[in-house]
């Protein structure tokens, strides 16, 4: 293999592809990055049996061929190369990387031992990248951090015609993001469950000026693919039954309050300073004022009052402040509507554009209150 390539393009492609290589691969061969030079392109791929990444960039190919090298090492090398052309060449069991006056020589890994990449499924539909990224960030708020609960570590993605719904729950809270997209088949109706960390990784690495194409084949329902700007990622799906969560949303919320979102987040952060670890902060809704408080009479205390627009009876609820802030931070509108039934049942949070407008149901965050002592 002999290739001439732009240094910056190579560094970017290697960094993007090697991001899926685990820090501690199950077998040494999975630390490899596969390079294939053919037809004026350099193709890069990495795979760890759960997630794969493929990329290709333009290259001057003097001699076609392939090579398998240690991915993380190549990433470190390419990001440090001078801003000139880079030349890759293989001979025997070594690959030489030359750029300007810098030369590196890497040992090749045994190409024949590298696993075959999964076949990318058929196209299911597409959506603009910013919409996809926002939905992933919102839905993944409630993904559990407990690796022992793989189903709760996943995001359920429902595809129904031109509507996509992403849902996650860790049993204490639930986050749901919805958006419209362009399906390949307007009658599509299917559900997948993908690991939240993998989904967030895909979203983080997108070119937001390009659409995201989602690939899925119901006849082989084990893999979900994502294509964007010439880059292709695949992820193994979680095998398990996601909890039935639709019943957690109340049909009617008799108590509703509209609050400036940033003002509320700031107040929560200040009051939470005195809260012991895992201790709740209390939110007392009365008239048109919300009073936040934390701490007990015999320890440090904090109280702050902010204005709100409320309908319904007075109520006091208490929450884990971290869960509150994470859910509120995922809302993109300037106001938040809190919808309540009782002090012990899940509270729904929605964003809204104006103080007196309707709430948006594109993002719905449910949070279960904590018990507290008066």
Image (spheres, rainbow, N blue to C red):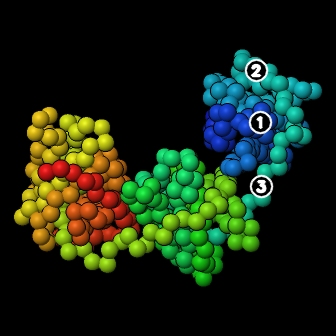
Furthest residue to the top? 101
Callout 1: few (<14), some (14-19), or many (20+) C-alpha neighbours within 10 Å?
few
Return the mark for residue 295.
none
How many numbered marks are there?
3
Q: CA distance from mark 1 to mark 3?
A: 18 Å
In the rendering, at what x and y percent does residue 82 appear?
64, 24
N-term mark: 3 or 2: 2
Furthest residue to the right? 92
Is residue 350 rendered to the left or right of residue 107?
A: left
Q: Which residue is mark 1?
A: 27
Residue nearer the viewer, 185 or 137: 137
Q: Secondary structure at mark 2?
A: strand
Q: Secondary structure at mark 3?
A: loop
In the rendering, at what x and y percent does residue 314 appear?
11, 65
Callout 3: few (<14), some (14-19), or many (20+) C-alpha neighbours within 10 Å?
some
In the rendering, at what x and y percent does residue 291 appear?
11, 52
Q: CA distance from mark 1 to mark 2?
A: 25 Å
Residue shown at the point (63%, 58%) measured from the top left: 238
Q: CA distance from mark 3 to mark 2?
A: 31 Å
In the rendering, at what x and y percent does residue 61 appear?
83, 40
N-term mark: 1 or 2: 1
* Foreground disc of the pair 1, 2: 1
Q: Which residue is mark 3?
A: 118
Q: Which residue is mark 2?
A: 104
Residue nearer the viewer, 164 or 305: 305
């Amino acid at each position: 293999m002999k290739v001439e390539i732009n240094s910056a393009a190579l560094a970017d492609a290697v960094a993007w592809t090697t991001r899926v290589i685990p820090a501690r691969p199950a077998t040494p061969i999975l630390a490899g990055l596969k390079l294939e030079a053919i037809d004026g392109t350099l193709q890069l791929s990495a795979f760890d049996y759960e997630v794969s990444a493929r990329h290709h960039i333009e290259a001057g190919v003097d001699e076609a061929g392939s090579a398998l090298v240690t991915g993380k090492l190549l990433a470190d090398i390419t990001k440090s190369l001078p801003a000139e052309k880079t030349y890759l060449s293989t001979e025997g069991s070594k690959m030489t990387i030359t750029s300007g006056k810098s030369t590196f020589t890497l040992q090749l890994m045994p190409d024949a031992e590298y696993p075959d990449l999964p076949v990318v499924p058929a196209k299911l539909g597409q959506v603009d990248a910013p919409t996809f990224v926002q939905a992933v960030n919102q839905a993944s708020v409630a993904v559990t951090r407990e690796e022992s609960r793989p189903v709760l570590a996943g995001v359920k993605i429902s595809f129904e015609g031109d509507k996509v719904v992403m849902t996650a729950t860790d049993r204490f809270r639930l986050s749901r993001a919805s958006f419209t997209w362009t399906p390949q088949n307007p009658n599509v109706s299917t559900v997948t469950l993908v690991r939240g960390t993998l989904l967030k990784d895909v979203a983080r690495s997108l070119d937001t000026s390009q659409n995201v194409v989602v690939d899925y084949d119901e006849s082989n329902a084990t893999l979900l693919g994502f294509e964007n700007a010439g880059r292709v990622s695949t992820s193994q799906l979680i095998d398990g039954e996601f909890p039935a969560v639709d019943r957690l949303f109340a049909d009617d919320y008799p108590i509703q309050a509209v609050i400036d979102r940033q003002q509320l987040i700031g107040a929560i952060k200040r009051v939470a300073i005195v809260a012991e670890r895992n201790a709740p902060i209390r939110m007392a809704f009365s008239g048109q004022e919300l009073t936040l408080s934390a701490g007990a009479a015999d320890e440090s205390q904090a109280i702050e009052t902010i204005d709100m627009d409320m309908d319904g009876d007075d109520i006091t609820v208490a929450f884990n402040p971290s869960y509150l802030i994470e859910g509120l931070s995922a809302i993109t509108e300037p106001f938040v509507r809190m919808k309540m039934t009782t002090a012990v049942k899940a509270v729904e949070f929605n964003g809204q554009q104006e103080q007196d407008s309707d709430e948006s149901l594109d993002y719905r965050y449910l949070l279960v209150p904590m018990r507290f002592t008066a």
